Amino acid sequence: MTQTLLHCGAKIVGPFPLPTRVERDNVLSGLSTREYAVYTHKRILPIIDPQAMIIQNVSALDVPPGVDIKEKEQKRPVDL
């Protein structure tokens, strides 16, 4: 995704990792229990002064199953 943004001429900062979310489940099977864990990793990739073409390219990206892209507009200036 970063390569696509740079190819379109976007100015990006990051990616910045967020805390990993861990979901743990215990499954009883017979006399034993098994513990399973699902890890969710999130990243923030700020785009500075995005153009409409860049937003359309990000929306049209083919991403693997289980990967979500959420767009959020923020008017706050970013300190570099």
Image (spheres, rainbow, N blue to C red):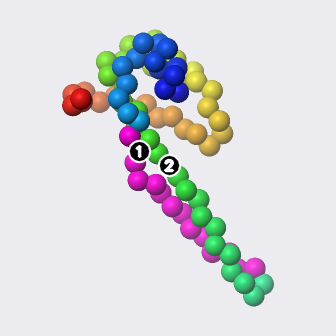
> Is residue 7 visible in the rendered structure shown here?
yes
Q: Residues within 10 Å of mark 1 (few under 14, many from 20)?
A: few
Element under disc 1: strand
Q: How many numbered discs?
A: 2
- Residue name at image x 63 percent, y 27 percent: 62
Q: Nearer the viewer, residue 80 or 72?
A: 80
Up-down relation of residue 6 to residue 45 (above or below) = above
Counting from the top left corner in percent of width and height, residue 41 is at 50, 49
Up-down relation of residue 40 to residue 78 (above or below) = below
Asked where in the image residue 37 lies, by quadrant, the reply is bottom right
Counting from the top left corner in percent of width and height, residue 19 is at 41, 53
- Residue name at image x 32 percent, y 22 percent: 48
Hey, what amino acid is under mark 1? Pro
Asked whether disc 1 touches disc 2, contact meaning CB atoms under 8 Å apart, the reply is yes
The quarter of the image holding the C terminus is top left
Residue 41: assigned label: 2
Q: Residues within 10 Å of mark 2 (few under 14, many from 20)?
A: few
Q: Nearer the viewer, residue 53 or 34?
A: 34
Which region of the structure is painted magenta? 16-29
Up-down relation of residue 19 to residue 70 (above or below) = below
Main SS category, magenta section: strand
- Residue name at image x 78 percent, y 84 percent: 30
Mark 1 to mark 2 CA distance (whole Å): 8 Å
Counting from the top left corner in percent of width and height, residue 2 is at 49, 26
> Is residue 76 visible in the rendered structure shown here?
no
Up-down relation of residue 45 to residue 61 (above or below) = below
Counting from the top left corner in percent of width and height, residue 64 is at 65, 36
Q: Is residue 3 left or right of residue 34?
A: left
Element under disc 2: loop
Q: Residue under label 1, please give it.
A: 17
Hey, what amino acid is under mark 2? His
